[in-house]
Image: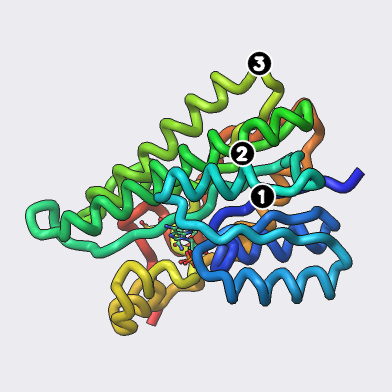
Amino acid sequence: MTKTVLITGATSGIGKACAERFAKEKYNLILTGRRQERLDSIKAQLENEFSIHVFTCCFDVQDKKAVFDSIQALPAEWQEVHILINNAGLALGREAFDEADMDDWETMLHTNVDGLLYVSRAVLPLIKNTGEGHIINIGSIAGKEVYENGNVYCASKFAVDAITRSMRIDLLKHGIKVTGIHPGAVETEFSIVRYKGEETKANATYKGLTPLTGEDIADTIFYCASLPKHVCINDLVITPLQQASTYYFFRKD
Ligand code: NDP
Ligand code: 8X3
Protein backbone atom coordinates (compact mmCIF):
# COMPACT_ATOMS: atom_id res chain seq x y z
CA MET A 1 0.00 0.00 0.00
CA THR A 2 1.30 3.46 -0.88
CA LYS A 3 1.68 5.68 2.16
CA THR A 4 1.28 9.45 2.35
CA VAL A 5 3.50 11.94 4.13
CA LEU A 6 2.45 15.55 4.76
CA ILE A 7 5.38 17.98 5.06
CA THR A 8 5.08 21.61 6.15
CA GLY A 9 7.69 24.07 4.91
CA ALA A 10 8.43 21.90 1.87
CA THR A 11 9.53 24.78 -0.37
CA SER A 12 13.09 24.92 0.97
CA GLY A 13 15.84 23.37 3.09
CA ILE A 14 14.97 20.44 5.34
CA GLY A 15 11.34 20.21 4.20
CA LYS A 16 12.25 20.11 0.51
CA ALA A 17 14.95 17.50 1.20
CA CYS A 18 12.34 15.40 3.06
CA ALA A 19 9.99 15.67 0.07
CA GLU A 20 12.75 14.38 -2.20
CA ARG A 21 13.76 11.57 0.22
CA PHE A 22 10.23 10.25 0.70
CA ALA A 23 9.46 10.60 -3.02
CA LYS A 24 12.48 8.42 -3.74
CA GLU A 25 10.92 5.80 -1.44
CA LYS A 26 7.64 6.01 -3.39
CA TYR A 27 5.53 7.79 -0.77
CA ASN A 28 2.79 10.11 -2.01
CA LEU A 29 3.25 13.64 -0.72
CA ILE A 30 1.15 16.51 0.55
CA LEU A 31 3.47 19.52 0.44
CA THR A 32 2.76 22.85 2.11
CA GLY A 33 4.36 26.28 2.23
CA ARG A 34 3.55 29.88 1.39
CA ARG A 35 5.27 30.00 -2.02
CA GLN A 36 2.90 28.33 -4.53
CA GLU A 37 5.29 28.61 -7.48
CA ARG A 38 7.94 26.62 -5.60
CA LEU A 39 5.36 24.03 -4.56
CA ASP A 40 4.30 23.73 -8.23
CA SER A 41 7.82 23.20 -9.50
CA ILE A 42 8.71 20.67 -6.75
CA LYS A 43 5.47 18.77 -7.48
CA ALA A 44 6.24 18.65 -11.22
CA GLN A 45 9.81 17.51 -10.65
CA LEU A 46 8.99 14.78 -8.11
CA GLU A 47 5.96 13.40 -9.98
CA ASN A 48 7.99 13.23 -13.14
CA GLU A 49 11.10 11.71 -11.58
CA PHE A 50 9.54 9.22 -9.15
CA SER A 51 6.06 8.47 -10.61
CA ILE A 52 4.33 9.37 -7.34
CA HIS A 53 1.36 11.66 -6.60
CA VAL A 54 1.89 15.08 -5.03
CA PHE A 55 -0.82 17.40 -3.69
CA THR A 56 0.12 20.96 -2.76
CA CYS A 57 -1.52 23.26 -0.20
CA CYS A 58 -0.46 26.89 0.00
CA PHE A 59 -1.08 28.48 3.40
CA ASP A 60 0.58 30.39 6.21
CA VAL A 61 0.75 28.10 9.26
CA GLN A 62 0.08 31.13 11.49
CA ASP A 63 -3.41 31.45 9.99
CA LYS A 64 -5.60 28.98 11.92
CA LYS A 65 -8.56 29.30 9.54
CA ALA A 66 -6.41 28.84 6.43
CA VAL A 67 -4.77 25.75 7.95
CA PHE A 68 -8.08 24.09 8.83
CA ASP A 69 -9.81 25.13 5.58
CA SER A 70 -6.95 23.73 3.47
CA ILE A 71 -6.71 20.42 5.31
CA GLN A 72 -10.48 19.95 5.45
CA ALA A 73 -10.69 20.64 1.70
CA LEU A 74 -8.30 17.79 0.80
CA PRO A 75 -9.88 15.54 -1.85
CA ALA A 76 -11.32 12.14 -0.85
CA GLU A 77 -8.24 10.25 -2.08
CA TRP A 78 -6.01 12.28 0.28
CA GLN A 79 -7.91 11.53 3.49
CA GLU A 80 -5.18 9.31 4.98
CA VAL A 81 -1.88 10.72 6.26
CA HIS A 82 0.61 8.17 7.61
CA ILE A 83 3.39 10.60 8.51
CA LEU A 84 3.21 14.30 9.40
CA ILE A 85 6.48 16.23 9.38
CA ASN A 86 5.99 19.52 11.25
CA ASN A 87 8.95 21.36 9.78
CA ALA A 88 7.79 24.91 8.86
CA GLY A 89 9.57 27.39 11.07
CA LEU A 90 12.01 30.22 11.30
CA ALA A 91 14.26 32.40 13.41
CA LEU A 92 14.13 36.19 13.04
CA GLY A 93 16.94 38.34 14.39
CA ARG A 94 19.61 37.59 16.96
CA GLU A 95 19.54 40.49 19.42
CA ALA A 96 19.63 40.72 23.20
CA PHE A 97 16.38 40.39 25.11
CA ASP A 98 16.22 44.15 25.77
CA GLU A 99 16.91 45.09 22.15
CA ALA A 100 15.13 42.46 20.03
CA ASP A 101 12.21 43.39 17.77
CA MET A 102 9.00 42.28 19.47
CA ASP A 103 7.26 41.79 16.10
CA ASP A 104 9.95 39.21 15.33
CA TRP A 105 9.20 37.50 18.64
CA GLU A 106 5.53 37.28 17.75
CA THR A 107 6.20 35.91 14.27
CA MET A 108 8.49 33.20 15.69
CA LEU A 109 5.99 32.17 18.35
CA HIS A 110 3.03 32.26 15.95
CA THR A 111 4.91 30.22 13.32
CA ASN A 112 6.98 27.76 15.35
CA VAL A 113 4.48 27.11 18.13
CA ASP A 114 0.93 28.10 17.06
CA GLY A 115 1.51 26.91 13.48
CA LEU A 116 2.70 23.50 14.63
CA LEU A 117 -0.31 23.19 16.95
CA TYR A 118 -2.82 24.19 14.25
CA VAL A 119 -1.38 21.85 11.62
CA SER A 120 -1.17 18.95 14.08
CA ARG A 121 -4.79 19.31 15.20
CA ALA A 122 -6.04 19.77 11.63
CA VAL A 123 -4.15 16.70 10.33
CA LEU A 124 -4.74 14.38 13.30
CA PRO A 125 -8.11 13.04 12.03
CA LEU A 126 -6.38 12.02 8.78
CA ILE A 127 -3.61 10.29 10.75
CA LYS A 128 -6.18 8.48 12.89
CA ASN A 129 -7.85 7.27 9.64
CA THR A 130 -4.76 5.08 9.05
CA GLY A 131 -5.02 3.28 12.40
CA GLU A 132 -1.32 3.99 13.04
CA GLY A 133 0.69 7.08 12.13
CA HIS A 134 3.80 9.04 12.97
CA ILE A 135 4.24 12.72 13.82
CA ILE A 136 7.78 14.07 13.44
CA ASN A 137 8.37 17.53 14.89
CA ILE A 138 11.42 19.55 13.89
CA GLY A 139 12.65 21.28 17.03
CA SER A 140 16.24 22.44 17.35
CA ILE A 141 19.31 22.13 19.55
CA ALA A 142 18.10 25.64 20.50
CA GLY A 143 15.16 23.87 22.15
CA LYS A 144 17.52 21.93 24.40
CA GLU A 145 19.84 24.70 25.61
CA VAL A 146 19.62 28.48 25.27
CA TYR A 147 22.38 30.68 23.89
CA GLU A 148 23.21 34.38 24.02
CA ASN A 149 20.69 36.42 21.99
CA GLY A 150 18.70 33.27 21.17
CA ASN A 151 15.94 34.17 23.68
CA VAL A 152 12.57 33.82 21.95
CA TYR A 153 13.73 31.53 19.12
CA CYS A 154 15.03 29.20 21.85
CA ALA A 155 11.76 29.58 23.76
CA SER A 156 9.75 28.63 20.68
CA LYS A 157 11.84 25.49 20.21
CA PHE A 158 11.69 24.58 23.93
CA ALA A 159 7.93 24.77 23.40
CA VAL A 160 8.18 22.42 20.41
CA ASP A 161 10.09 19.97 22.62
CA ALA A 162 7.43 20.17 25.35
CA ILE A 163 4.60 19.77 22.84
CA THR A 164 6.38 16.78 21.28
CA ARG A 165 6.70 15.05 24.66
CA SER A 166 3.08 15.81 25.52
CA MET A 167 1.83 14.55 22.18
CA ARG A 168 3.73 11.30 22.70
CA ILE A 169 1.88 10.67 25.95
CA ASP A 170 -1.56 11.79 24.81
CA LEU A 171 -1.50 10.06 21.41
CA LEU A 172 -0.11 6.74 22.65
CA LYS A 173 -3.64 5.35 23.00
CA HIS A 174 -4.11 5.87 19.24
CA GLY A 175 -0.89 4.01 18.36
CA ILE A 176 0.67 7.17 16.94
CA LYS A 177 4.45 7.53 17.17
CA VAL A 178 5.83 10.98 18.00
CA THR A 179 9.46 11.86 17.32
CA GLY A 180 11.39 15.06 18.03
CA ILE A 181 14.30 15.88 15.71
CA HIS A 182 16.61 18.60 17.01
CA PRO A 183 19.27 19.72 14.54
CA GLY A 184 22.26 21.97 15.09
CA ALA A 185 23.63 24.03 12.20
CA VAL A 186 22.06 23.05 8.88
CA GLU A 187 22.89 25.16 5.82
CA THR A 188 19.55 26.13 4.25
CA GLU A 189 17.72 29.45 3.77
CA PHE A 190 17.38 29.58 7.57
CA SER A 191 20.19 32.09 8.20
CA ILE A 192 19.26 34.30 5.24
CA VAL A 193 15.76 34.53 6.75
CA ARG A 194 17.10 35.06 10.27
CA TYR A 195 19.37 37.92 9.21
CA LYS A 196 16.77 39.33 6.79
CA GLY A 197 18.91 38.95 3.68
CA GLU A 198 22.19 40.20 5.22
CA GLU A 199 24.49 37.72 3.52
CA THR A 200 27.63 38.53 5.51
CA LYS A 201 25.91 37.65 8.79
CA ALA A 202 24.19 34.62 7.28
CA ASN A 203 27.41 33.24 5.82
CA ALA A 204 29.27 33.77 9.13
CA THR A 205 26.98 31.14 10.68
CA TYR A 206 28.68 28.41 8.68
CA LYS A 207 32.21 29.91 8.44
CA GLY A 208 34.93 27.32 9.08
CA LEU A 209 32.33 24.56 9.45
CA THR A 210 31.13 21.65 7.41
CA PRO A 211 27.47 22.15 8.35
CA LEU A 212 24.71 19.60 8.10
CA THR A 213 22.62 19.63 4.93
CA GLY A 214 18.87 19.30 4.55
CA GLU A 215 19.59 15.87 3.05
CA ASP A 216 21.41 14.76 6.25
CA ILE A 217 18.29 15.58 8.28
CA ALA A 218 15.96 14.03 5.70
CA ASP A 219 17.96 10.77 5.79
CA THR A 220 17.66 10.70 9.59
CA ILE A 221 13.93 11.43 9.47
CA PHE A 222 13.43 8.70 6.89
CA TYR A 223 15.34 6.27 9.12
CA CYS A 224 13.04 7.11 12.07
CA ALA A 225 9.98 6.69 9.85
CA SER A 226 11.05 3.34 8.42
CA LEU A 227 11.59 1.40 11.67
CA PRO A 228 9.31 -1.52 12.60
CA LYS A 229 5.84 -0.66 13.90
CA HIS A 230 6.76 -1.39 17.55
CA VAL A 231 9.85 0.88 17.57
CA CYS A 232 9.65 4.65 18.19
CA ILE A 233 12.63 6.98 18.30
CA ASN A 234 11.53 9.63 20.78
CA ASP A 235 14.19 12.29 20.54
CA LEU A 236 17.29 12.99 18.47
CA VAL A 237 19.81 15.85 18.67
CA ILE A 238 21.95 16.00 15.53
CA THR A 239 24.89 18.35 15.03
CA PRO A 240 27.75 18.71 12.59
CA LEU A 241 30.94 17.07 13.91
CA GLN A 242 32.37 20.55 14.60
CA GLN A 243 29.45 21.60 16.86
CA ALA A 244 29.29 20.36 20.47
CA SER A 245 26.53 22.63 21.83
CA THR A 246 24.50 25.68 20.79
CA TYR A 247 27.54 27.89 21.37
CA TYR A 248 30.66 25.68 21.20
CA PHE A 249 31.98 25.27 17.64
CA PHE A 250 35.43 24.12 16.54
CA ARG A 251 35.82 26.24 13.41
CA LYS A 252 38.71 25.86 10.95
CA ASP A 253 40.14 28.67 8.77
P1 NDP B 1 14.35 27.22 5.43
O1 NDP B 1 14.23 28.68 5.64
O2 NDP B 1 15.19 26.73 4.31
O3 NDP B 1 12.89 26.57 5.30
C1 NDP B 1 11.83 26.97 6.13
C2 NDP B 1 10.53 26.46 5.55
O4 NDP B 1 9.47 26.86 6.44
C3 NDP B 1 10.23 27.03 4.20
O5 NDP B 1 9.77 26.00 3.35
C4 NDP B 1 9.13 28.05 4.46
O6 NDP B 1 8.25 28.05 3.36
C5 NDP B 1 8.43 27.46 5.69
N1 NDP B 1 7.75 28.48 6.47
C6 NDP B 1 8.31 29.47 7.20
N2 NDP B 1 7.36 30.24 7.74
C7 NDP B 1 6.16 29.72 7.35
C8 NDP B 1 4.82 30.07 7.57
N3 NDP B 1 4.48 31.12 8.34
N4 NDP B 1 3.85 29.33 7.02
C9 NDP B 1 4.17 28.27 6.24
N5 NDP B 1 5.43 27.88 5.99
C10 NDP B 1 6.41 28.60 6.55
O7 NDP B 1 14.89 26.64 6.82
P2 NDP B 1 15.17 25.15 7.34
O8 NDP B 1 14.86 24.15 6.31
O9 NDP B 1 16.52 25.17 7.93
O10 NDP B 1 14.12 25.10 8.55
C11 NDP B 1 13.18 24.07 8.71
C12 NDP B 1 12.96 23.85 10.19
O11 NDP B 1 14.17 23.42 10.79
C13 NDP B 1 12.53 25.10 10.98
O12 NDP B 1 11.55 24.73 11.90
C14 NDP B 1 13.82 25.51 11.71
O13 NDP B 1 13.55 26.21 12.89
C15 NDP B 1 14.41 24.15 11.97
N6 NDP B 1 15.83 24.13 12.24
C16 NDP B 1 16.73 24.63 11.34
C17 NDP B 1 18.08 24.60 11.63
C18 NDP B 1 19.11 25.18 10.72
O14 NDP B 1 20.26 25.39 11.17
N7 NDP B 1 18.80 25.44 9.45
C19 NDP B 1 18.58 23.98 12.86
C20 NDP B 1 17.55 23.50 13.73
C21 NDP B 1 16.24 23.56 13.41
P3 NDP B 1 7.60 29.36 2.70
O15 NDP B 1 8.58 30.48 2.85
O16 NDP B 1 7.34 28.96 1.28
O17 NDP B 1 6.36 29.55 3.47
C1 8X3 C 1 18.74 26.54 14.47
C2 8X3 C 1 19.97 26.23 15.22
O1 8X3 C 1 21.66 27.09 16.91
O2 8X3 C 1 21.07 28.56 15.06
O3 8X3 C 1 17.63 26.03 15.13
O4 8X3 C 1 19.53 28.21 16.87
S1 8X3 C 1 20.57 27.60 16.05
Looking at the picture, does residue 241 appear above or below residue 154?
below
Spatial separation of the CA atoms under disc 2 and disc 3? 17 Å
Mark 1 Cβ inside 8 Å of ligand 1: no
Q: Residue at x 30, y 54 (%)?
A: 107
Q: Residue at x 44, y 55 (%)?
A: 89
Q: Report the disc number at residue 173.
A: 3
Q: Residues within 10 Å of mark 2 (few under 14, many from 20)?
A: many
In front of the other: 77 or 165: 77
* Residue underneath mark 2: 123
Amino acid type, callout 1: Leu
| Tally of numbered tags | 3
Q: Quadrant of the N terminus?
A: top right
* Residue underneath mark 1: 6
Residue 121 pos. (x, y %): 54, 34
The mark that comes first in sequence, 2 or 3, is 2
Spatial separation of the CA atoms under disc 3 and disc 1? 22 Å
